Amino acid sequence: MDRLTVVIITRNRRAELSRTLGRLRALPASPAIVVVDNGSDDGTVAAVGAEHPDVRVVPLGRNRGAVGRNIGVHLARTPYVAFSDDDSWWEPGGLERAADLFDAHPRLGLIAARVLVGPDRVPDPVNALMAGSPLPAEPGQPGPSVLGFLACATVVRREAFLDAGGFSSLLFFVGEERLLAYDLAAAEWARCYVPEIVAVHEPSPHRPPSRQRRRAELRNTVLTMWMRRPGPVAFRETARMGAAAVRDGDARAALLAAAVRMPAALARRRPLPRAVESGIRRLAEETKAQCGVKDILGEA
């Protein structure tokens, strides 16, 4: 496929990456692939070179987190880029459909795909959230508007991604998608959920401990608030996390980590346009109204 490149970031998941590359290479219209290696020491780089010599491998030497995707996008020579993780891939026909939609909708910046999880292909709960998005649909766009997505199941217009600045180096990893969604919206790029485009995610058993991921997500929630949301909102939510930190060690650790990064976050502060902020509030209210849905602090 000459319109689209798949960018994969990986670190020490040689076997999973090999499976993903095999799946992508088996697609009827096999795309160009760029693998950005975040400092693996398990022979990943050499293995990809031996098994898939047509795949471009970029060894970074150290773990740069989600910024590895930015590097892959810069290296891509196609107008559209799909992201896979080393444990996810795309179902046949989806990438061609995504490219066709981008061709037909010049202000479409991002497509969020339907995600099927595990060998039983169970629908990810995020599918229902995106399908039922309360955000106003943008006229002429191919699906509901979204302000969040899963990076491993996303296709972007390269121009839009670069225009929005890509993934933040400050956030590193976990929950980094939210800030990019905000920035795409602020730059007036449409973001749509298109369920006919399907990504499969078979989560690797080699994952960071859940506590580590939760702390990173809490930290990045605070940092994103201070980088983009109104001051009173950022202050209120930070104070709420501070109150939770009295009994919650993860919240306490996240606040300390956020404090270290706060000067850099404030230097990057750029409040969102009123329309985008209104959409964020509407989405938050709708989520809280759903029975049984809890926020990141575990509160309904």
Image (spheres, rainbow, N blue to C red):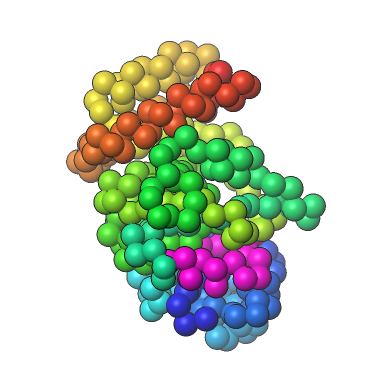
Front-most of residues 115 and 243: 115
Front-most of residues 52 and 154: 154
Q: What residue sits 35% from the left and 37% below the top?
A: 224
* Residue 64 visible in the snapshot: no
Q: In this view, does 168 lie to the left or right of 203?
A: left
Residue 140 in percent (x, y) is at: 40, 55
Residue 125 in percent (x, y) is at: 64, 40
Residue 267 in percent (x, y) is at: 20, 41
All told, the count of numbered labels is 0
* Residue 240 visible in the snapshot: yes
In the figure, 145 relative to 95: above or below? above
Q: What residue sits 62% from the left and 71% below the top?
A: 93
- In the rendered image, which quarter is residue 263 located in? top left
In the figure, 14 relative to 51: above or below? above
Residue 34 in percent (x, y) is at: 49, 74
The magenta segment is: 81-102
In the figure, 197 relative to 275: above or below? below
